[in-house]
Image (tube, rainbow, N blue to C red):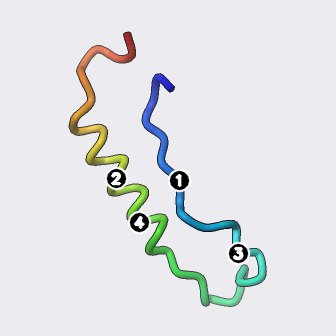
Amino acid sequence: LPFIRTSVDHGTALDLAGQGRADAGSLLEAVIQAERMAGNAPLGGPP
C-alpha cells in the first residue's frame, strides 16, 4: 500500500457498544505504531 495502515487486534465488540466497558488500549497501540512508522517513512511520498 502507498500509505501507512494499522489495525486493532480485535473485532468490533458490538456487544459492548454503549456500555462504557470497551478498552481502547488496542486502538491506542495501533495509532502509536502508525506514528512510529510515519517517522521512518521516506520523504516525497510513495515511489
Report how far apart the C-alphas of labels 2 and 4 lie in the structure: 9 Å
Foreground disc of the pair 2, 4? 2
- Residue type at mark 1 is Ser
Disc ID at residue 13: 3
Asked whether, in this view, residue 43 is left or right of residue 33, the answer is left
Q: Residue furthest front?
A: 9
Residue drawn at the location 70% of the way across and 75% of the way down: 13
Residue drawn at the location 48% of the way across and 41% of the way down: 5
Report how far apart the C-alphas of labels 3 and 1 lie in the structure: 14 Å
The tag earlier along the polypeptide, 4 or 3, is 3
Disc ID at residue 42: none
Asked whether, in this view, residue 28 is left or right of residue 13, the answer is left
Residue drawn at the location 40% of the way across and 55% of the way down: 31
The tag earlier along the polypeptide, 4 or 1, is 1
- Residue assigned mark 2: 33
- Residue assigned mark 4: 28
User: SS of the residue at dot 1?
Assistant: loop
Asked whether, in this view, residue 40 is left or right of residue 10, the answer is left
* Label tally: 4
The tag earlier along the polypeptide, 2 or 1, is 1
User: SS of the residue at dot 3?
Assistant: loop
Report if the CB atoms under discs 3 and 1 are less than 8 Å apart.
Answer: no
- Residue assigned mark 1: 7
24 to 35, vertically: above or below: below
Image spot of residue 21 (x, y percent): 61, 89
The tag earlier along the polypeptide, 2 or 4, is 4
Image spot of residue 46 (x, y percent): 39, 16
- Residue type at mark 4 is Leu
The tag earlier along the polypeptide, 2 or 3, is 3
Look at the image and tell me in which quarter the C terminus lies.
top left
Report how far apart the C-alphas of labels 4 and 1 lie in the structure: 10 Å
